[in-house]
Amino acid sequence: MVEIRYGERYEMADLAGKSVAQAREQYKPEFGIPDKAQASLNGKGIGKKHEPMTALGDDDSLTFAEKSRKGLFFIGAILLALAITGGIFAYGATADIVDLDLTAQSDFAAVEVASPPSWNVYGSYKGQVGTGTLFTITPDDGGGVPANAWTGDMSVILTITNAHDLVAAYRILVLEIEVWDLADTSIGTTEYLTMGVGEISIEFTQLTAGPYTVEITDGFYITHRGGWTANAEDPSIFCQVLQRSAP
C-alpha cells in the first residue's frame, strides 16, 4: 500500500506500480491537488517532468504540498522597509550647494599677423629670403597689472599650408624662424621651416613681459625656371600658439 497525502487529506491506497503523475491525476479531484503542488516521494522532492517516470512501490509515502509564500512575503516586507527608510534618509539628508564665483578671461594669448617681409623671386636663381616679423603674440593681461598677467610657458607651431603649390616655383626653400621678446632677445630655439619639413615648434618661457614676435631671421631659396603659375612663389604660413604650463 502507498500512503498519499495532501494537506489534511490522507489515504492508504493500492498505487504500487503506478507513476507519481498517475497518482496525482487520480487523487486530484478528490483531494483538490493543484497543478502547482510539489510532489515528494519518501521525503524527496520530485520534479514535475520526472513524475511520469517515477514509479510507486509498496510502503512508499507520496505527499503533495504547495510551496510556502512566507519567505516571499518576508523578503517583500524587508524590501518595502528599505525603500521607505531609504526614502526618509534621502529626503531628510542635510545638503547644500555652492556657486563658485570665478573670473572669466579671454584666450590666454592672442596671435596677430604683423608686417611680413617681401622679396623678389627670380626663376633659375639662388637667392636670400627677406627677413622680418611674421606674427605678434600677446599674452592675456588679465585686465590689470602687470601687462602680461598670464605668465605660463608657450609653444609656437608654424606650418606651411601650401607646399603643393610651392614645388612649382622652388627646388629648395629654407626659412630660419625665431621668437623674440621686447628686449630684442631671441628666446627658445632656432628652427628651419622648409617644404620638406613643413611644420616646426618653438617652445619658450616668459622671462620678460610680452608681446613676442615670430620672425624670419635668415634663409635662402633655389627656384626652377620661370613660368610657374601665379603666386606659386608665395608661402602660406599658419601660426598656432599652445599653452605649455600653468601661469
Image (cartoon, rainbow, N blue to C red):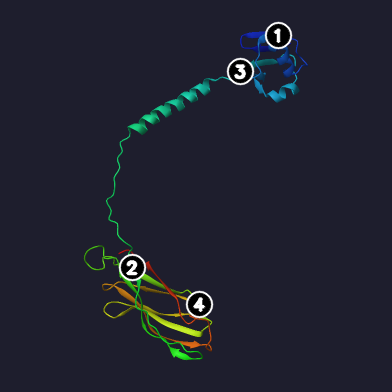
For the residues bearing labels 1 and 4, Cβ distance under 8 angstroms: no
| Residue that mark 1 sits on | 12
Between marks 2 and 4, how big is the CA–CA gap? 26 Å
Q: Residue 92 location, x and y as percent?
A: 33, 32
Marks 2, 3: nearer the viewer: 2
Closer to the observer: label 2 or label 1?
A: 2
Q: Amino acid at mark 2?
A: Ala
Dot 2 crowding, Cα within 10 Å, few <14, some 14–19, many 20+: some
Instruction: Pick the residue in front: 47 or 242.
Output: 242
Which quadrant would the C terminus be assigned to in this image?
bottom left
Q: Is residue 4 above or below residue 102?
A: above
**Quadrant where the N terminus is found in the figure:** top right
83 to the left or right of 31: left
Which circle marks residue 110 in the picture?
2
Q: CA distance from mark 2 to mark 3?
A: 81 Å
Instruction: Give amino acid for label 1.
Output: Met
Q: Is residue 119 above or below residue 60?
A: below
Residue 26 pos. (x, y %): 73, 12
Which x, y percent locates residue 112? 35, 71
Residue at 33% over, 71% down: 137
- Tag shown at residue 66: 3
The residue at which mark 4 appears reads as 163
- Residue 121 occupies which quadrant of the picture? bottom left
Helix, strand, or loop for circle 3? loop
Query: How many callouts does the rendering have?
Result: 4
Tell me the residue at 40%/27% (across/down). 84
Q: Earlier in the sequence, mark 2 or mark 4?
A: 2
